[in-house]
Amino acid sequence: MKFEEKIKRIEEITLLLQKDSTDLEKAIELYEEGIKLSNEVEKKLQNIERKIEIVTSAPDENEDGVEIADYKTTDSPSNSIQ
């Protein structure tokens, strides 16, 4: 099941659990399914967060592998990147 499908199913489960007509056994099954999906979604989000941290903490490099921080810039519009 895709991430988006898991989120949608969690929303469906939440609505079903809020209904008074859901019997106890069904409510327990739904709750267990919701917890399982919630844990899977949380794990996926943590993995994505780690990837973002890696990408954003990596040094900025251009296509040639030269770090952008190696270039000097000035505030003067007449001067270009050296």
Image (cartoon, grey):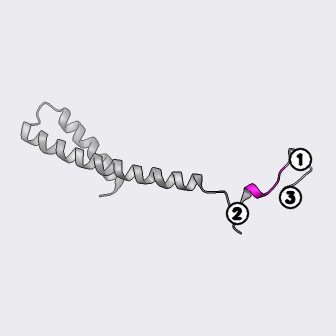
Count residues near mark 3 (Cα–Cα under 10 Å), then give few for <14, some for 14-19, many for 20+. Answer: few
Where does the N terminus fall, quadrant-wise?
bottom left
Magenta residues? 69-73
Task: Count the marks.
Answer: 3
Disc on res. 82:
3
First in residue order: circle 2 vs circle 1 = 2
- Specify the amino acid type for callout 1: Pro
Question: Is-magenta flag for residue 70?
Answer: yes
Residue 24 horizontal/vertical position (percent): 8, 37
- Name which of mark 3 and mark 1 comes first in the sequence: 1
* Helix, strand or loop at mark 1: loop
The disc, 2 or 3, on the residue closer to the chain's N-terminal end is 2
Residue 31: x %, y % from top left: 18, 41
Secondary structure that dominates the magenta span: loop
Q: Which residue is depicted at the point 68% across and 61% down? A: 61
Task: Point out the image quarter for the C terminus.
Answer: bottom right
Residue 49's disc number:
none
Left or right for 7, reference 13:
right
Q: Which residue is identified by label 2? A: 62
Residue at the spot 29% in from the left edge and 48% down from the top edge = 39
Q: Is residue 76 above or below residue 71?
A: above
Q: In the image, is residue 65 above or below residue 34?
A: below
